[in-house]
Image (cartoon, helix red, strand yellow):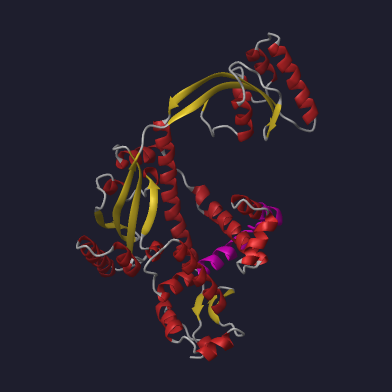
Amino acid sequence: MTRTLTLATFLMFLLIGAPSAAEQAEELLIDRILAVVNDDLVMLSELRDEAEKIEERLRLKGVSPMPSTAAIQKQAFDTLVLRKLQLAEAARLGLEADEETTNRAVAAIAANNQMSAGELREALAAEGLDYETFRNSLRDEIVITRLRNREVTNRIQVTKSEIDSYLERSGGDGRTAVRLSYIMVAARDGSTPEQREASRLKAAAVVERLRAGEGFEAQAQQFSDDQTGLQGGDLGWLDVNSIPPLFQPYIAKMQKGDTEGPIASARGFHIIRLTDVRHSESKIVRQTKARHILVRTNEVTSDDEARRRLAQLRERIVNGDDFDTLARSNSDDKASAIKGGDLGWSTPGNLVPEFEQQMDKLDLNQVSQPFKTEFGWHIVQVLGRRDYDATDETRRDQARKAVRDEKAEESLEAYLRRLRDEAYIELRLDDFGA
């Protein structure tokens, strides 16, 4: 008869009941069911593989001391369950990654490692990794990303007041990046006031130990309910505009080495340490003022026709005709056509790469040859260039991203928690012969 048990007890049994050497040899041929997750299964072989991946990532990061086997096993199990739930939900919604998309992702990984696709396959084989397994894993990650974008990320809205509030909290001492260490003591959804108070007291005790000189890494590995606890709580370097808004008012007042906490939130109680700080100067960018004429292609206008028309317009401009007048009567970019093709001052990254590449080649007042982008065919003329202090705009852009990322993270946690709460998960003890 199948029995259910808590995850903590289950993993304890998994570790205490580790097989003998003879049993281990037998298990090379026999896999076991660890859990039923809706219509899917978590297998012992999957848990081992995932735990090995986690251990390898921690080793590469130089984490020392390594977390306990129990902590790694628990994270591996949680990762497997959430992955299966997300893939099942994506399938229900009809989300998938076709062969072309997967091929492009493989090619991008190969290019980032300065390899061809064939060399990547050989490198994987040299590491004992199966290429098809690699592709399947990559395809799953693409599908999960699409699910998260659809259900979480694309629904996030950031208001001007949220950006203003974030910038006000972040302070103005010239910091550009901070390095943080982090511990989170969870207070689960539905906790009673007594349970929440117990979590607060646990976090407060950790803070006292930290301020008494005990090591942050050891405390994080032992007490943190966040996955970063396995890495000693190190969050690495964060742009000041990427710091979670919850921590901004504290970090703005903290000095290097300071510890703050417990900081309360709906998720639980947080402890942060400011381990290092970076400062930098204003951000000066080279802006370009340009105007253009666009001819779009369609069933009537071919590439050759668009190029020919623009070549004729360019010839007229070079011979003295007014660019402004020709843009108003010929450009298919209606937003700029009414301004004589004027695009205003643009910062690098504002325009599509093909357009910027052509624009950057030009001298002042020079008119380009016709060229193509995803929008159609263009000619462009550069009217001016200037160095511009974009510090404020950059800070607002970074603040917008930080607020968006924070809201997305909270929404994703809630979404994944709902998926898990609504799932049928049954842990199988009998499959271990108990």
Residue 362 in picture, x, y percent from top left: 61, 22
Q: In this orientation, which residue lies closer to the viewer: 329 or 10?
A: 10
Q: In this orientation, which residue lies closer to the viewer: 238 or 215?
A: 215
Asked if the stretch drawn in magenta spans residue 94, the answer is yes
Horizontal arrangement in the rendering, residue 291 relative to residue 268 (left or right): right
Considering only vertical position in the picture, is 294 above or below 23?
above
Which image quarter: residue 63? bottom left
Residue 56 in picture, x, y percent from top left: 49, 67
Q: Main secondary structure of the magenta part?
A: helix
Task: Answer yes or no: is residue 74 visible.
Answer: yes
Residue 28 in picture, x, y percent from top left: 59, 83
Q: Residue at x 39, y 53 (%)?
A: 236
Asked if the stretch drawn in magenta spans residue 179, the answer is no
Task: Answer yes or no: is residue 5 visible.
Answer: no
Extreme front residue here? 126
Q: In this orientation, which residue lies closer to the viewer: 409 or 191?
A: 409
Residue 126 in picture, x, y percent from top left: 63, 66
Q: In this orientation, which residue lies closer to the viewer: 283 or 424?
A: 283
What is the tally of numbered marks visible in this picture? 0
Considering only vertical position in the picture, is 410 above or below 167?
below
Q: Residue at x 70, y 53 (%)?
A: 100
Horizontal arrangement in the rendering, residue 118 relative to residue 349 (left or right): right
The region drawn magenta spans 79-104
